[in-house]
Amino acid sequence: MRLIIAEKPSLARAIAEALPRPHKPARLHIECGGGSDVVAWCAGHILQTAPPEAYGAEYKTWRLEHLPIAPREWKLEVSAPELLRSIARLLKNAERVVHAGDPDREGQLLVDEVLRFLGYRGPVDRLLVSDLSYEAVLRQLDALEPNAKYRPLYESALARQRADWLYGLNMTRLYTLLGRAAGYKGVLSVGRVQTPLLGLIVARDAAIARFRPVPYYLVAAEIRAGGGERFWAFWVPPEGAPTDEDRRLLGRDVAEAARQRVVGQEGRVAACTEDTRTETPPLPYSLADLQMDAGRRLSMSAKRVLDACQSLYETHRLVTYPRSDCAYLPEGQLLEAFDVFTAIKAQASVLGDAARKADWTRRSKAWNDRKVTAHHAIVPTPTMRRDVASLTESERAVYELVCRRYLAQFYPLHEYLQTTIEVEVAGERFEASGRQTTKLGWKALYADPETEGAPVPAEADKDRERESVAPPPRLTPGARVTVDVAAVLDKRTSPPKPFTDASLIAAMVSVAKFVQSPDVKKILTEADGIGTPATRAAIIETLFERKYVERVGRTIVSTETGRALVRSLPEVATTPDMTAVWEAAMRAITEGTQTSGAFLDRVGAQLEKLVAEGRALGRIAVPAVAPASPAPRLPKPSARCARPRRSADTRHPIPKNARRRPR
């Protein structure tokens, strides 16, 4: 008998479907081909690293003199005994085992640790499945590899697991004891990911608190062409003008002088360009992208989005595996498109018309086998359910987001005309730009197509401040123009924005932009930030549970407890650099250029130093009770921008975008 051990039940069912019949499902396994193959499954990690008390009863009590705790022989505890007993029984009759964990570091560890724990010594093959479609699984079953080939992947995952245990457990006990010495009653948890995330929030709140707005100025001119066309353009300060790094003009007297030079003067069109541009539909969702989008559109927390997604996947089977960091799809899934449209029409009535208009013969760049990782993007399944009325409000909202993004792959490109005009008046240069939609394409799926596709979280763009509400007219270079009205607009720089659910997930994914070292930045970019799709929501929730952060309206701000902890910790604990160093080590272990033992020795040495530094503090001042903190104080908004006096025949007011304050 050949025993195939999958990482989770959904993968086990997909593998069984591709195996010979008859199938005989049991509660914890599926017999296939009359018993020649048996497919069993784990449910994530069914073994956990044992707690400190497993190495000695004295460690149940938290004491400084015990630290650092570093096991010589590592122990595991069973978290799903029934599943483990079932696999153990099946292993007794197995002539061969197929490891069907996910094709990534964690998936390799998950099944290997079970086989090692149960003492299995027989032959093991490796099955790598990232696409659960019948054809893809069948193809991979014919391409089994020796599991020994992936031993370095297991070693790197095991090293990361043990290093996280060593660091998190010892640092949490250390700083909790230091806090209790000063009267703090709770647990001060410290982790490789959660504490740098807290450090980002504390740093953002500090930047907001110390922010002082800086005034800057725009010169806006209403320009009339010879044919009577009117449009607004903005002065481009010349080299040598007092500007900041974003080319914002800092001298009002300079702006006023420019205004006086051009008002009522004639000039000419120096250049006029019209470009037809297109926007491709956004790729299907990875979990982080879905959490950001749902946070922005629906004000949903990362945990609420993940919970809704997990229910849609496990209970309703309406979406594919949710804990994915990939935005691409296997090319074979294109064959399911028509059936998915049918399911969307039946189960998301608001999208019925959109599904009918989708062109299933169209192929976006989302379908790319080479870019699919351990899991493909989150998309709707062709499953038809009659109980969709039982979906919760969160489940329905998330399902509709996933469906809308999927349908966008089958719509035409969005097209628009980008017009840019350069005008010279009295030796000064003015620019005007704007866009006009010529074909909605995939943006027809969204309520506000003009803003769809903006970055998440939406960051102020200084260039859009100078973009007209309506596109400027098409004029011939050399055409004469006149400045009818000109005005100096008083502006003020805006403070950084407090974090929200959406921007906090974005910060975890793009944490590289918050570090200075080019080497660290490169590693964090390649590693897709800190945390994983499976852990990010839980890490954020931990910050709330420990009362390190709290919500103020839609924003997430640090509490005095969180700020005090960050102040007391060494810098290495509050920045993402350690994750980058560890990630580099994991790659070296996978490539065979470093051993897991050498890496753990370095972690242990660093821990000895951190514990010694902590002991030297004696105690840390953290509030005994975490009080509710006010939101970071924002500067008062600037006065309304000055507006020019308008002549009787002026029909175009200053563009609304010109009254926005950039970041």
Image: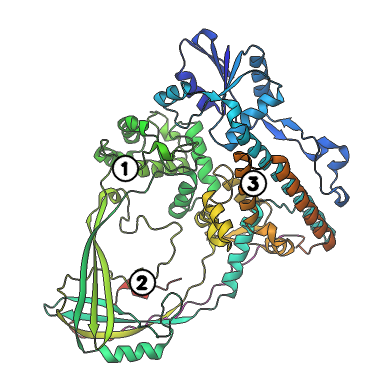
Q: Is residue 628 magenta?
A: yes
| Magenta segment | 625-643
Q: Disc number at residue 465?
A: 2
- Residue type at tag 3: Ala
Mark 2 neighbour density, 10 Å: few (under 14) some (14–19) many (20 or more): some
Mark 1 neighbour density, 10 Å: few (under 14) some (14–19) many (20 or more): some
Q: Which is more toward the observer, 517 or 279?
A: 517
Say which residue label 3 marks: 585
Q: 179 above or below 98?
A: below
Q: Quadrant of residue 627?
A: bottom right
- Residue type at tag 1: Ser
Q: Earlier in the sequence, mark 1 or mark 3?
A: 1
Q: 91 above or below 466?
A: above
- Residue type at tag 2: Glu
Q: How far apart are the two marked residues, 3 and 2, measured between alpha carbons?
A: 45 Å
Query: Magenta region, mostly helix, strand or loop?
Result: loop
| Foreground tag (3 vs 2) | 3
Q: Earlier in the sequence, mark 3 or mark 2?
A: 2
Q: Is residue 97 magenta?
A: no
